[in-house]
């Protein structure tokens, strides 16, 4: 790959947010990115911006529509990339995306969780290309998430040494 992944993001008009800052007083006894050998296990992420955790909040299908939630899932992908980069140094170390698991806080009878998660998956494939970016994925609806997040997305990637 001749261009950096960061240059590809810039060409797409996208920038990574700063690495996540946990709100003061919130105890989280885990790490958002856990490196184990050549694997990076990425904890469930909300969206983040310069101010820290930024939701989105509420139920998809009630408080947010599918298109709005898919855009938020795309933003969550940027959050994941920011935290992954902070942990591994260069995104070019990602040798392959293994899996993505998305939980969508869903209104009763909402059934478009897969479309919401396309926002995340499409960004990963657009940035990393189809070979490195392809991944297995599950998208489920849940009755609630911590802090009333509208969604939380986790992933696993393989790293080059």
Image (cartoon, rainbow, N blue to C red):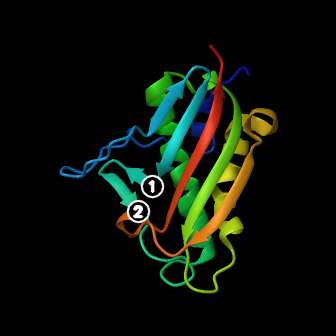
Q: Nearer the viewer, residue 90 or 109?
A: 109
State which quadrant residue 142 falls in: bottom right
Q: Is residue 1 above or below residue 127?
A: above
Q: Is residue 99 above or below residue 137?
A: above
Instruction: Write the residue at 72% across / 52% down.
Output: 137
Q: Residue at the location (71% across, 66% down)?
A: 114
Q: Which residue is mark 1?
A: 47
Looking at the rendered image, the quarter that the C terminus falls into is: top right
Using the image, determine if residue 43 lies above or below residue 150: above
Q: Quadrant of the N terminus?
A: top right
Q: Residue at x 61, y 27 (%)?
A: 39
Question: Which of the 4 image quarters holds residue 58?
Answer: bottom left
Question: In the displayed structure, does residue 122 sit left or right of residue 60?
Answer: right
Image mark count:
2
* Residue assigned mark 2: 55
Most foreground residue, 19 or 30:
30
| Residue 88 x %, y % | 50, 23
**Callout 1 touching callout 2 (CB < 8 Å):** yes
Give the crowd class for mark 2: few <14, some 14-19, many >=20 residues within 10 Å. Answer: some
Q: How much space separates mark 1 and mark 2, taking CA atoms?
A: 5 Å
């Amino acid at each position: 790959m001749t261009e950096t992944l960061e240059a590809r993001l810039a060409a797409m008009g996208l920038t990574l947010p700063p690495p996540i800052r946990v709100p003061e007083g919130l105890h989280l006894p885990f790490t958002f990115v856990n490196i184990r050998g050549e694997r990076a296990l990425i904890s469930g992420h909300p969206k983040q911006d310069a101010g820290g955790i930024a939701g989105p909040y509420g139920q998809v299908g009630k408080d947010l529509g599918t298109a709005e939630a898919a855009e938020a899932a795309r933003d969550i992908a940027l959050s994941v990339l920011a935290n992954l980069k902070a942990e591994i140094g260069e995104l070019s170390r990602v040798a392959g995306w293994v899996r993505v698991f998305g939980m969508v806080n869903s209104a009763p009878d909402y059934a478009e969780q897969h479309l919401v998660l396309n926002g995340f998956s499409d960004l990963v494939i657009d940035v990393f290309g189809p070979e490195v970016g392809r991944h297995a994925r599950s998208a489920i609806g849940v009755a609630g998430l911590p802090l009333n997040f509208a969604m939380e997305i986790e992933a696993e990637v393989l790293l080059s040494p």
